[in-house]
Amino acid sequence: MEGRPVNLRRTDRDQDEHWTDDAACRGADPEIFYPVGFAGPALEQETVAKAICAGCVVRSDCLTWALRAGEPDGVWGGTTPEERRLLRRMSA
């Protein structure tokens, strides 16, 4: 699964297509989506990751997956972990 964020794994190997096949992040450096820290280079990485997500045709699928899986790290569906925590609280 080279070129995809590490946690993007297919759960159904028999399925021909998966939403991750169309992800805009496919082929991007996974480290962009996992900034370390909250300032400087980490903010730049987050901005780049969110820009990639902004034009992604499967952004909502990605976000839905991250919310359902409780993904604690990284930028998924254009959201940070903090933003996903807020979304979970608002939907509870």
Image (cartoon, helix red, strand yellow):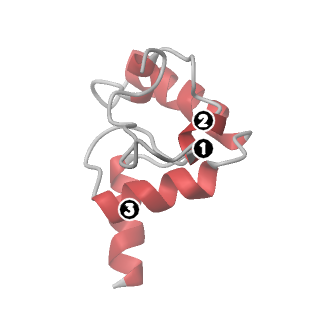
- Numbered circle sitting on residue 17: 1
- Which of the 4 image quarters holds residue 60? bottom right
Can I make out residue 28 in this image? yes
Image location (x, y in percent) of residue 74: 36, 37
Mark 1 or 2, closer to the camera: 1
Q: Residue at 48% of width from left, 62% of height from top?
A: 64
Front position in the image: 59 or 49? 59
Q: Is residue 18 above or below residue 2?
A: below
Q: Which residue is mark 3?
A: 67
Q: Residue at 58% of width from left, 42% of height from top?
A: 16
Does residue 77 appear left or right of residue 23 in this picture? left
Q: Is residue 9 above or below residue 19?
A: above
Q: For numbered disc 1, what is the local secondary structure?
A: loop
**In which quadrant will I find the N terminus?**
top left
Real-space CA distance between mark 3 and mark 2, rounded to the nearest whole angstrom: 19 Å
Q: Is residue 28 above or below residue 87?
A: above
Amino acid found under the numbered disc labelled 3: Leu
Residues packed near mark 2 inside 10 Å, few (<14), some (14 to 19) or many (20 plus): few
Q: For numbered disc 2, what is the local secondary structure?
A: helix
- Mark 3 vs 2, N-terminal side: 2
- Numbered circle sitting on residue 64: none
Real-space CA distance between mark 3 and mark 1, rounded to the nearest whole angstrom: 21 Å
Q: Which residue is mark 2?
A: 21
Image location (x, y in percent) of residue 66: 39, 54
Q: Do labels 1 and 2 touch, CB within 8 Å?
A: yes
Does residue 76 appear left or right of residue 26 in this picture? left
Q: Do labels 3 and 1 touch, CB within 8 Å?
A: no
